[in-house]
């Protein structure tokens, strides 16, 4: 059974999440390099609730993974969109139904959301298969960005 709790500003929470965030962002599941200082800022912002929510995922007392979530209004659907920025499960916690449990939880936790959105690399076949089984479909349009330091 997966247990989920919001990250706190406790140093141990932040350290645990940062270790997993770095593992995720330095894996084939992410197709671009992200500087460690950016990842550290993201974890700090999640712990402070500064525009992003961070969740630690537990299998009993053992940490199983984490998730980062943001919300915004999407004019094209006329309502709240929950963006699942990251969903990471440790290797030995995959294939145990935790992904399905997480998505059931997030839909219950964000009852007022009209859309749930995520990004996935094409190489992450296992994640794609899970997301499709859960009813996710492809959003077919490009995105452009202007980034600031």
Image: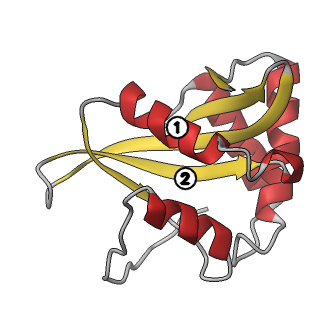
Q: Quadrant of the C terminus?
A: bottom right
Residue at image position (52%, 69%) is 147
Mark seen at residue 85: 2
Locate residue 11 relative to residue 3 in the image: left or right: right
Q: Secondary structure at mark 1?
A: loop
* Front label number (1 vs 2): 2
> Can the viewer see residue 118?
no
* Few, some or many residues within 10 Å of mark 2 (<14, 14–19, 20+): some
Residue at image position (37%, 41%) is 71
Q: Quadrant of the N terminus?
A: top right
* Residue 42 % position (x, y): 67, 44
Q: Is residue 107 above or below residue 97?
A: above
Residue beneath disc 1: 52
**CB-based contact (under 8 Å), mark 1 and mark 2:** yes
Q: CA distance from mark 1 to mark 2?
A: 9 Å
Q: Quadrant of residue 122?
A: bottom right
* Residue 48 % position (x, y): 61, 24
Q: Quadrant of residue 19?
A: top right
């Amino acid at each position: 059974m997966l247990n989920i709790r919001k990250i706190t500003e406790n140093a141990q929470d932040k350290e645990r999440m940062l270790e997993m965030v770095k593992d995720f962002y330095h894996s084939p599941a992410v197709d671009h390099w992200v500087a460690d200082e950016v990842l550290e800022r993201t974890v700090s912002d999640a712990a402070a609730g500064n525009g992003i929510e961070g969740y630690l995922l537990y299998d009993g007392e053992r940490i199983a993974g984490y998730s980062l979530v943001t919300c915004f209004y999407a004019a094209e659907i006329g309502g709240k969109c929950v963006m699942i920025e990251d969903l990471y499960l440790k290797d030995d916690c995959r294939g145990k139904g935790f992904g399905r449990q997480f998505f059931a939880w997030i839909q219950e936790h964000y009852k007022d959301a009209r859309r749930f959105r995520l990004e996935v690399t094409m190489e992450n076949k296992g994640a794609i298969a899970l997301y499709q089984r859960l009813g996710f479909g492809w959003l077919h349009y490009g995105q452009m960005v202007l980034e600031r330091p």
